[in-house]
Image (spheres, rainbow, N blue to C red):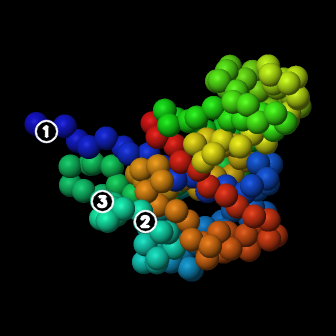
């Protein structure tokens, strides 16, 4: 029997403020359905959704012919769909094998020990202050710039089975998301398992 294709990764959309959540997440999903980014729920009670008829127009795809599987196949191979994650009381950290070390917010040097920092951060995410080994600057890791290779948030939308940098959210999509969080900006990053 041939092996099924591997999951390629995910595009993660989240408010730039990692503590921010939509007041009414159900309204956000309904809004995404109304603009054609999301479609019907996958399974009863699930937090996963098929992609809407404007999904392709609300993202910019890189490369000459991206191979995006938009519907579930008969053999169960991974396909592109939307998953809602959160809201959580505290920011959650998502990273993958594509994660690159962030830079210190002060001296801009790389923090190669980021994995240990984030492990310690999980014990007290609201008040933890990481110390830069280069300049001793203290900052909460939720404010690190992960250069779109990791991120934190209390509410996230995961577009499953998107290879890192394969699809970039359009300005229109990011503006539509802002309307659901009192005009607060959203950003995105990519995770590869």
Report, in whole angstroms, how far the alpha carbon at label 2 lies from the one at label 1: 29 Å
Q: Nearer the viewer, mark 1 or mark 3?
A: 3
Q: Tell me the residue at 75%/39% (across/down).
A: 144
The N terminus, quarter of image: top left
Report the residue marked by disc 3.
67
Residue 33 versus residue 99 in the image, above or below = below
Q: Nearer the viewer, mark 2 or mark 1?
A: 2
- Residue 20 position within the rendered picture, expressed as x and y whole percent measured from the top left: 79, 54
Report the residue marked by disc 1.
2
Looking at this rendering, what residue extends furthest in the left direction? 1
Q: Nearer the viewer, mark 3 or mark 2?
A: 2
Mark nearer the N terminus (2 vs 1): 1
54 on left or right of 107: left
77 on left or right of 57: left
Query: Is there CB contact under 8 Å for labels 3 and 2?
Result: no
Q: How many marks?
A: 3
> Nearest the camera: 147 or 128?
147
- Residue 82 position within the rendered picture, expressed as x and y whole percent measured from the top left: 49, 59
> Nearest the camera: 95 or 160?
95
- Residue 177 position within the rendered picture, expressed as x and y whole percent measured from the top left: 67, 69
Q: Is residue 52 visible?
A: no
Quarter of the view holding residue 91: top right
Q: Residues within 10 Å of mark 1 (few under 14, many from 20)?
A: few
The secondary element bearing badge 2 is classed as strand
């Amino acid at each position: 029997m041939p092996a099924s294709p591997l999951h390629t990764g995910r595009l993660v959309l989240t408010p730039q403020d990692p503590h921010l959540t939509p007041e009414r997440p159900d309204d956000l999903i309904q809004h995404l359905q109304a603009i054609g980014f999301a479609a019907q729920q996958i399974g009863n009670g699930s937090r996963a959704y098929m992609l809407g008829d404007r999904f392709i127009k609300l993202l910019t795809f890189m490369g000459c012919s991206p191979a995006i599987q938009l519907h579930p196949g008969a053999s169960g191979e991974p396909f592109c769909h939307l998953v809602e994650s959160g809201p959580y009381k505290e920011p959650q950290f998502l990273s993958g094998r594509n994660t690159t070390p962030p830079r210190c917010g002060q001296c801009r040097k790389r923090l190669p020990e980021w994995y240990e920092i984030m492990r310690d951060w999980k014990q007290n995410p609201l008040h933890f202050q990481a110390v830069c080994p280069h300049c001793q600057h203290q900052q909460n890791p939720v404010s690190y710039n992960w250069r779109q290779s990791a991120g934190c948030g209390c509410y996230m939308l995961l577009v499953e089975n998107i290879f890192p940098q394969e699809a970039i959210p359009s300005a229109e999509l990011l503006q539509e998301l802002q309307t659901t969080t009192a005009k607060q900006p959203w950003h995105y990053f990519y995770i590869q398992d």
